[in-house]
Image (spheres, rainbow, N blue to C red):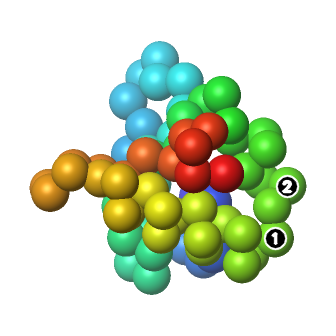
Amino acid sequence: MLCEVCGGPAVDRSPPGYGGVKVNCPRCGNYSIAGSVRDKFRQLSLDERLRALERAKDHASLGMRPLIGATEL
């Protein structure tokens, strides 16, 4: 798969039935995108996607995978 943020090679870690996507990217790190915002997220520019990921990282608890949801967009 390709990273939803940077477009580079990544690994899809989404469990079966998960509504969003869980990504492991060597460049962007590990993160999730909620299914409810995935389509809107894909329409953002690269800079906007990077900012959303940074906001998700800021909101994530220590040791937790950052989740990009409505508040990060």
- The 10 Å Cα crowd at callout 2, few under 14, some 14 to 19, many 20 or more, is few
Which numbered dot is residue 45? 1
Is residue 13 in view from this perspective?
yes
Q: CA distance from mark 1 to mark 2?
A: 7 Å
Q: Residue at the location (52% across, 48% down)?
A: 68
Percent position of residue 58, x then y: 36, 63
For the point 45% across and 82% down, which residue is it?
A: 27
**Label at residue 43:** 2
Residue that extends furthest to the top in the rendered view of this protein = 17
Q: Nearer the viewer, residue 20 or 72?
A: 72
Q: In which quadrant will I find the N terminus?
A: bottom right
Q: Tell me which amino acid carries mark 2.
A: Gln
Residue 62 image position (x, y, % from top left)? 14, 57
* 65 horizontally vs 43: left or right: left
Can you name the residue that lies furthest to the left here? Answer: 63
Residue 11 picture location, percent across and down:
44, 59
Name the kind of residue labelled 1 in the image.
Ser
Q: Is residue 63 above or below residue 45?
A: above
SS under mark 2: loop
Q: Is residue 5 visible?
A: no
Of residue 28 and residue 44, the one placed in the foreground of this image is 44
